[in-house]
Amino acid sequence: MKTTQILIAGFGGQGILFAGKFLAYKGLLEDLQVSWLPSYGPEMRGGTANCNVILSDDPVGSPIVTNPDVLIAMNLPSLQKYVNDVVPGGQIYVDSTLIAEKVQRTDVEVYYIPATQMANDAGVPTLANMVMMGHVLQHNPELSFNGTDVTVQKLVPAKKAALVELNMKALEAGRDYEG
Amino acid sequence: MAERVLMKGNEAIAEAAIRSGCRHYFGYPITPQTEVAAYMAKRMPKIDGVFLQAESEIASINMVYGAAAAGMRVMTSSSSPGISLMGEGLSYIAGSDVPAFVVNVQRGGPGLGGIQPSQSDYFQATRGGGHGDYHMIVLAPASVQEMASLTVKGFNLADKYSMIAMILADGTIGQMMEPISFEDVEIEHYDKPWALTGTQCQRRHNIVNSLYLQPDVLEKKNFERYEKYRAVEENEALHESYMMDDAEVCVVAFGIASRVAKNAVVAARAEGIKAGLIRPITLWPFPKKALSEAADQVKSFLSVELSMGQMVEDIQLATGCRRPVSLCNRVGGMIPSPDQVLASIRKAAKGEN
């Protein structure tokens, strides 16, 4: 029995909710129980956005993530707000293009990924979120990178099929990054 | 089994309503239920249905009244302040004994309140909401799958008893996504001989009305209606029991609060506290029998709610106040954490309030 609680946070417009949807669908296709809960409050309207995703072998109880196993921080306020909520032994993923600060905790694994820079370099400047996701998959074998293309196809509407390739490019860049 | 897809709770309601044969939706946008209307706006025109964004909630509910009087499967959806505006129309629909399906995805109140999740419309929903003696069947989903299944059930019950069925959800269940599969939807058909479908000069015309100026006639109508309500209370109360077999502390919670409470019950069991959960699925009729039986066995009850304790008195009524009922709550858009509920369970186990 394993349950992974994930919190993704950043600015509105960075694709925080989409990234969460990606993980939730990935979990669904791996036959896990999943829940996805967005922030929909005033903070979302032009401010910070966050998204709770739970992946579990068992039915999900509360969909609210208070102490994440995995934190993905896409801006500094999000990192500062949630860094101490992560469970000991958890993982923190930091977009190091946008966040210069280092995590002081020593009881968690921290991954610094210059995702925004990498997305720019790869010609997909709006997909830093998916660069981060590629790296998250790399370190969470229960999700694995296999079948990522099928997951993306589920998320991208048919008339925007060209976006599948771009998302895959970003995901692969994140997967291959060795920081 | 049908394919599992990820869907928001609000979207699940809309899709389930369409599969239940609903082809008339009237509404007015309000957070956090807007996805219901958005989904209907997209789908209804493609299936020869009606989506109409009215000029207000008052207009919406009266359009619902009209379509219901014509015998159509019809619905509206809103959130707390919008439902308050609908109070008069709900009462008219109840007084006319026509079926309608209404969704309230609650937000914090009173007044404009906020837009975050809440369960503080419990009294309004379970006691009727508008003026006069009446009830609505109130269904409280705790998952996206239940948003769909209770929508199907709601339409069937509304037709069966010719009354309003309401989904009382909250912003969390409305906004969250979970996997859902749509099994074959079973639409129950009930005759509607009272419906305003045109006489074709073959029968006397029908009248749908809630005005009875003769007090004895109005009294009779009320007595008859309460006979119907007695049948609903007898036959339609639903609940889920979780770890209740040997429970000494019975947590009572519905909707999102029940999801949090379940985590806390599991944690309490891990500490050796014999906790269990009764989750009312229908809030009216309240699952009185289950609560009353639990009172024979448990030492105390703990109500977990996103309100100031509106369900507490229903627990006390159902159990005849035989056991203490304590409250664990957050309000205004806040949600209790599993740890907060666990702390309350520990207290209840020790006999503290």
Image (cartoon, coloured by chain):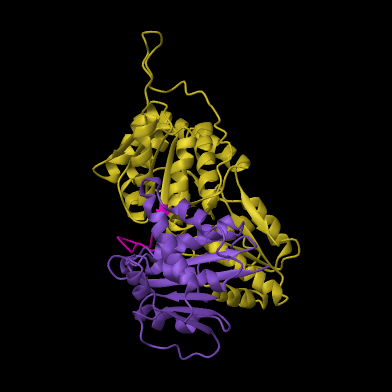
Chain colours: A purple, B yellow
Residue at 56% of width from left, 36% of height from top? B185
Q: Is residue B21 magenta?
A: no
Residue nearest the observer in this picture, A132 or B285? A132
Residue nearest the observer in this picture, A137 or B24? A137
- Side of A96 relative to B335 (left or right): left
Residue at 70% of width from left, 74% of height from top? B270
Residue nearest the observer in this picture, B315 or B144? B144
In this rendering, the answer to whether B249 lies above or below B319 is below
User: Magenta region's main secondary structure?
Assistant: loop
The answer to whether residue B336 shows anywhere in this view is: no
Q: Is residue B110 magenta?
A: yes
In this rendering, the answer to whether A71 lies above or below A151 is below
The percent coordinates of residue A177 (x first, y second) are 47, 75
The percent coordinates of residue B201 (x first, y second) are 36, 8
User: Magenta residues?
Assistant: B105-116
Locate residue A14: give its quadrant: bottom left
The percent coordinates of residue B241 (x first, y second) are 67, 56
Q: Quadrant of the N terminus of chain A?
A: bottom right
Q: Furthest-left residue in view?
A: B55
The answer to whether residue B110 shows anywhere in this view is: yes
Total number of numbered labels? Answer: 0
The percent coordinates of residue B280 (x first, y second) are 58, 54
Locate residue B71: give its quadrant: top left
Residue nearest the observer in this picture, A16 or A59? A16
In this rendering, the answer to whether B93 lies above or below A137 is above
Q: Furthest-top residue in view?
A: B202
